Amino acid sequence: MKFASDLSIVIPARNEMFLAKTIETILQNMQGDTEVIAILDGAWADPVIPDHPKVRLVHHAESIGQRAAMNEGARLSRAKYIMKIDGHCSVDEGFDVKLMADCDYDWTVIPRMYNLHAFDWLCTDCDWRRYQGPTPEKCERCNGPNVVRDMLWQPRMNRKTDFARFDKTMHFQYWGSFKTHANAQGDIADTMTSVGACFFMHRQRFWDLGGMDEAHGSWGQFGVEVACKAWLSGGRHVVNKKTWFAHMFRTQGGDFGFPYPLSGRQVDRARKHSRALWIDNKWPLAKHDLNWLLERFRPVPDWHDVPSRAPDVEVPAPPPQPEQPRMIDSAPVVSNPTKGILYTTDNLLDDTDIGIAVQHRLLEMDLPIAAVSLKPISFGKNMTVQRDRGHETWMRQLLTGLETMTCDVVFICDHDVLYHPSHFLFDPAHRDTFYYNMNAWKVSAEDGRAIHYDTKQVSGLVAYRSALLDHYRARIARIDCDGFDLRSGFEPGSQKPYARFDSRGGDTFNSEFPNVDIRHDTNMVSTRWSRNQFKDKRNCPNWQEGESVPGWGKTAGRFAEWLRMVDSGPD
């Protein structure tokens, strides 16, 4: 299979003041076909991440949590390998090619870890210097106020970690003495667990193991989960001593603490779930039990009372998961399917009468709304794709929203289309078909003139989420490999050979009352207001012109007044 890139580095980041520096270091030291996917989880990066063709940013106005952010980044990846790294790390020169050179399919690999000496506090008046930590109120030598952060960003070579374990509560522990164990020898060596700040593996293997288990909660037991899944599934969890990453530990509180808000209850929840999975052997994909793992690393401190090796737990392995994008989902349609709205906007209409009216109408539908924008907005569940406005960006917005939705059927909605309630009554008859509402009129925001002709538009697209996910994953994979090409069109289910991304087809329906597509001066696609503008009249069948829209009233010569009436409530 052809991959869009060799490696995707996923960075779940929240309130990370060092994220820009981490990404800069990765870009400087990577040597392969590697990209960065940073999930800005509840906060924009500060300082701002400079634009770079190898960096993708996804912003969430509200935090979804570190595990969910990692899963989202992995879903967006089309690479052969994925790597998770924290947003306050440095990396070795050529770290990516070194990791890719030594990674069997069933391995989870961590680079050798050093502590990161990111900065010192420096007084510019007396040259007093203090190791990184919370912001000092003043110089501790001269009491002066001129204390600045002096960036160093270098590994502490005397603070090296290769091996770690967990105790009987599944709590992470360093294990330096393991270096004398037979399994610890060589450049690629077994390690029982890791801190969870960085790991590397085949992307499909990540999904074979179920991704990150969000039942743990946002944070906690990250390294234990990754390692236990690697070992108990029948694979290996190893350290590659030929390369390294350096991690900054923030344990001093204040403005130098962990970026995610944590409580003792959250930590206890993660550890309780972890004990149930591994000690009580409740992970359904396990081929071995925990005793098997403890015997492999015996003697393990805190586990001296472990009995001799117990028989392996015989749990049937799940069927192999196909590489994405998947083939057609032939499952039957769902009775009373759940529905949701995927709303996309370029933010140009946010504070206008048009944009406000469209949002008000959608809220009245009482359906869950995933709103994907280029800047944060207070509407629905907001996600942000930080890219310039354009057709490719719009498709990435659609995929971002689809990845986070959980409903069965998705109604794709634009920020400049007024949707009638009858539109949302439609139920797709087939899971593998893309349906277009042909009952739509175009209305000019300038003079209110209205036209209709039969045409398929994504703004009227309704389909099962599974079909839409496969289609847009395939689209983005082609864009990542070959670049964006207008010849591929926009409408899923197209019959044009170049635009085929799967074998699904398209169909049409007509809602009882039409939707209204408002044409204004910031539309990305121009409007043809006369049949004479079409070279081939077959492209505008059932052409109609009028001063009003059925079910919506007169628009010609009174657009502003009409829009105020429409925004007063549903018909």
Image: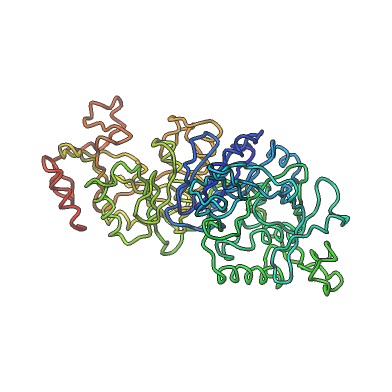
Indicate the quadrant containing the N terminus: top left, top right, bottom left or bottom right.
top right
Toward the front, the furthest residue is: 142
The residue positioned 80% from the left and 66% from the top of the image is 294
**In the figure, residue 453 lies in which quadrant?**
top left
Q: Is residue 157 left or right of residue 500?
A: right
Above or below, comparing residue 473 to residue 368 in the picture: above
The residue nearer to you, when weighing 511 against 33, is 33
Residue at the (79%, 71%) spot, across then down: 302
229, above or below 24, in the image: below
Image quarter for residue 457?
top left
Residue farthest to the top? 535
- Which residue is at a point 56% across and 41% down the rendered structure image? 21
Q: Note whether 399 is above or below 269 in the view shown.
A: above
Q: Is residue 225 left or right of residue 137?
A: right
In this figure, what is the number of numbered marks? 0
Looking at this view, name the residue that lies furthest to the left.
557
Q: What is the basis of the colouring in this image? A: rainbow
Give the vertical position of 534 relative to 242 (above or below): above
**Depth check: 145 or 342 in front?**
145
Q: x%, y% of residue 298?
A: 85, 65
Q: Is residue 455 left or right of residue 170?
A: left
Where's residue 536, x and y in %? 30, 26
Closest to the observer, 537 or 489: 489
User: Which quarter of the image is occupied by the C terminus?
Assistant: bottom left
Image position, residue 524 (x, y; %): 33, 34
Where is residue 33? Give x, y as percent.
63, 34
